[in-house]
Amino acid sequence: MPLYGAVVVGPPGAGKSTFCAGLCRYLSLAERPCALVNLDPACEGEGLTKFAIDVRDFVSVDAVMKDQKLGPNGALRYCLEQLWKSNWLKDQITSLEEDDCFPYVVFDCPGQTELYVHDHSLRGILDDVRREFDARFTAAHLVDVAQCAVPTSYVAACLLSLTAMLRLELPHINILTKMDMANRYDLAMPLEFFREAQELHRIAPFCGVQPCSLDEDNVEEEPSAYARQLQKLSGKICELVDDFSLVCYEPLDVSDGESVAKVVRLLDKCNGHPCGVHAPQSLIEDATELFLLHRGGTDGPSISVDGDNRGAAGRDREPRRAPRTVRTHNIGAPPPDVGQRGPGSFSWYAS
């Protein structure tokens, strides 16, 4: 069976690690073995995260900075170049195979966008893995919904999403994360506009305008020279993105099981995973509802999904506390009973 997986990329703060944690937790509830792979040599997760494969076991930014006298970005590029030249990652992935089957692999990639915009190392690593294991990957590019609040930032995010699609050359979806916070921002356009990313020239006049005057009636009649140049540049970028007509965004609230389930279906559709076609609908619904029942971050008693629990999931609207991501999934162990914390469990929250 081929190796299937998701390559999670995006700028720092977009929610990549939280998304990877939520994705692995959902797959576990759906009884789909998964393995989380850290490809960030600068990841700071000691004591909080546990990966099936961690590139820091091979090379780390701190060690390279000390030994090679490099800065943070130079050390990060050096680490990925060394990983590309070695067979370490392929050997580690081989060790995940059980009964001629691989788990679903989720790659948590570095946030430095130059690694896949300008550098060839990350793409080379993924290409080598694809050739070795006949792998079917889908790239998921994450963008924080907060970028929509600043028109110039959103235009830049669209350009970055397009660049990632062209450079990685993988089946690709773009995801607008942290949608549960979207109502906190004053947006220049309706949220649907930012999701569809069509006719971007409509947002160019708002570039360079102060956030307090985003209404069309309040746009300055005579913007400054800087604002005029910024609007002109933004307009050209919007025209470029529109010409390709490739960019659109799938909204995601990682605390909402239905939202995560929709993203999982898109990932499966892109890479052709059999579960995306043959998985029983009841199993998908159960995983979604169990995800909702445990979104508050506490371990409850063992439960089964029935009519009462479905109603409880729908009525549960209490504000949730900010989560700490804890990845403890062991793909070598069978899924435990819901509510138990065992070697094969996946705990998303911790107190």
Image: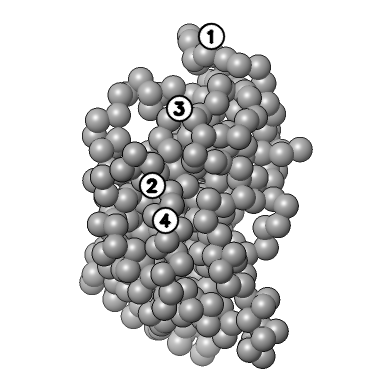
Task: Tell which circle, 3 or 1, labels the residue nearer the N-terminal end.
Answer: 3
Indicate which label's residue lies in the foreground, 3 or 1.
3
Q: Which residue is mark 3?
A: 287
Q: CA distance from mark 3 to mark 4?
A: 26 Å
Q: CA distance from mark 2 to mark 1?
A: 39 Å
Give the quarter of the figure containing the N terminus: top left
Around disc 3, counting alpha carbons within 10 Å, would you say few (fewer than 14), some (14 to 19), or many (20 or more)? many
Whether residue 69 sits left or right of residue 205 in the image: it is right
Asked whether residue 26 appears in the rendered view, the answer is no
Are the two marked residues, 2 and 1, in contact with CB atoms closer than 8 angstroms? no
Q: Which residue is mark 1?
A: 308
> Which element carries disc 2, helix, strand or loop?
loop
Q: Nearer the viewer, residue 102 or 172?
A: 102
Q: CA distance from mark 3 to mark 2?
A: 24 Å
The amino acid type found where label 3 is placed reads Ala
Q: In the picture shown, does residue 207 fall above or below 49?
A: below
Residue that appears at 71% across and 39% down: 350
Are the two marked residues, 3 and 1, in contact with CB atoms closer than 8 angstroms? no
Question: Quarter-wise, where is residue 280 in the image?
Answer: top left
Q: Which residue is mark 4?
A: 93
> Which element carries disc 4, helix, strand or loop?
helix
Are the two marked residues, 2 and 4, in contact with CB atoms closer than 8 angstroms? yes
Indicate which label's residue lies in the foreground, 3 or 2.
2
